[in-house]
Image (cartoon, rainbow, N blue to C red):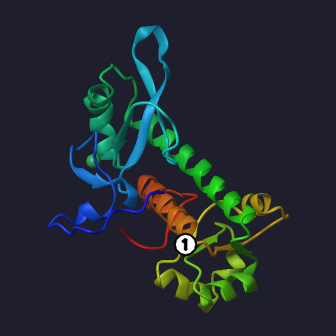
């Protein structure tokens, strides 16, 4: 991850937030490093020469021509209609439902990958008491299983939620699987960049699913 050059402040706040990208939906500029827009790449050829499909590249690791889009229904809709075809200079075939579905799947894989990376780097605290101690010591993020009912009443968690540090992801079994245990209700991330990226991704997914759905994603901080 290249650090943004900071030697010259400009009027534009985006200038200090890494590369500026243009959303293929609304056409507005956004800072990709802040996670405002997500990367989309050309996927496999669609049926009957109708154009190519698109795939999300949330780790920004794929080669080739990419496009950027705000993870929102409104921008997905516009991008599906014409924005991606323009950005890729080739017909693309997708719609808002397919894009939303693909985005949520990509976000799930991304968060799982980040959690596994954090564990491999030994930058996690697993289990309730260890997590609350890590938060006390400045951990930037705590991931709460959606079925972690026993910890929901704890004031330490309420505190983490009010400070915008908590996101909800997966079940206790899912988090347990990622951490190499049976069931895990809480995982604190003690690595700043990984923790921030997990929060960003969970919140973007939560915004997509909307608060009305019985989502796996619960944003702890209104956007
Ligand atoms: Zn947009």
- Front in this rendered view, residue 14 or 1: 1
126 over 214 or under it: above or below: below
Q: Is residue 209 left or right of residue 188?
A: left
Q: Is residue 46 left or right of residue 146?
A: left
Is label 1's Cβ within 8 Å of ligand 1? no
Work out which quarter of the rendered image holds the C terminus and state it: bottom left
Position of residue 24 measured from the top left corner of the image (x, y, whole percent): 28, 39
**Farthest residue, direction front:** 7
Q: Is residue 219 left or right of residue 20?
A: right
Position of residue 90 measured from the top left corner of the image (x, y, whole percent): 33, 20
Position of residue 141 measured from the top left corner of the image (x, y, whole percent): 57, 74
Disc 1: which residue: 192
101 over 48 or under it: above or below: below
Residue at 71% across, 65% down:
121
- Front in this rendered view, residue 220 or 92: 92
Residue at 85% across, 64% down:
182
Position of residue 198 measured from the top left corner of the image (x, y, whole percent): 55, 63
- Front in this rendered view, residue 150 or 223: 223
Residue at 43% across, 73% down:
221
66 over 190 or under it: above or below: above
**Farthest residue, direction left:** 11
| Number of on-image labels | 1
Which of the 4 image quarters holds residue 195? bottom right
Residue at 70% across, 62% down:
171
**Label 1's element?**
helix
* Structural crowding at the residue carrying mark 1, measured as other residues with C-alpha within 10 Å and reported as few (<14), some (14–19) or many (≥20): some
């Amino acid at each position: 991850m290249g650090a943004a050059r900071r030697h010259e402040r400009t009027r534009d706040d985006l200038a200090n937030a890494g590369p500026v990208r243009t959303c293929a939906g609304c056409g507005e500029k956004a800072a990709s490093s802040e996670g405002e827009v997500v990367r989309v790449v050309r996927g496999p050829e669609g049926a009957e020469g109708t154009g190519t499909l698109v795939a999300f590249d949330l780790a920004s690791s794929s080669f080739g021509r990419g496009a950027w889009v705000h993870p929102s229904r409104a921008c997905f809709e516009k991008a599906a209609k014409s924005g991606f075809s323009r950005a890729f200079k080739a017909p693309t075939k997708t719609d808002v439902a397919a894009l939303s579905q693909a985005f949520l799947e990509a976000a799930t894989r991304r968060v799982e990958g980040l959690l596994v990376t954090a564990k491999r780097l030994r930058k996690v605290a697993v289990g309730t008491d260890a997590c609350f101690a890590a938060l006390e010591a400045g951990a930037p993020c705590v991931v709460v299983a959606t079925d972690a009912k026993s910890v929901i009443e704890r004031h330490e968690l309420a505190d983490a939620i009010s400070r915008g540090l908590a996101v909800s992801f997966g079940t206790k079994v899912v988090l347990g699987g990622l951490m190499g245990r049976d069931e895990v209700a809480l995982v604190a991330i003690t690595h700043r960049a990984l923790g921030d990226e997990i929060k960003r991704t969970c919140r973007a997914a939560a915004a997509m699913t909307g608060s009305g759905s019985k989502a796996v994603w619960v944003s702890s901080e209104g956007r």
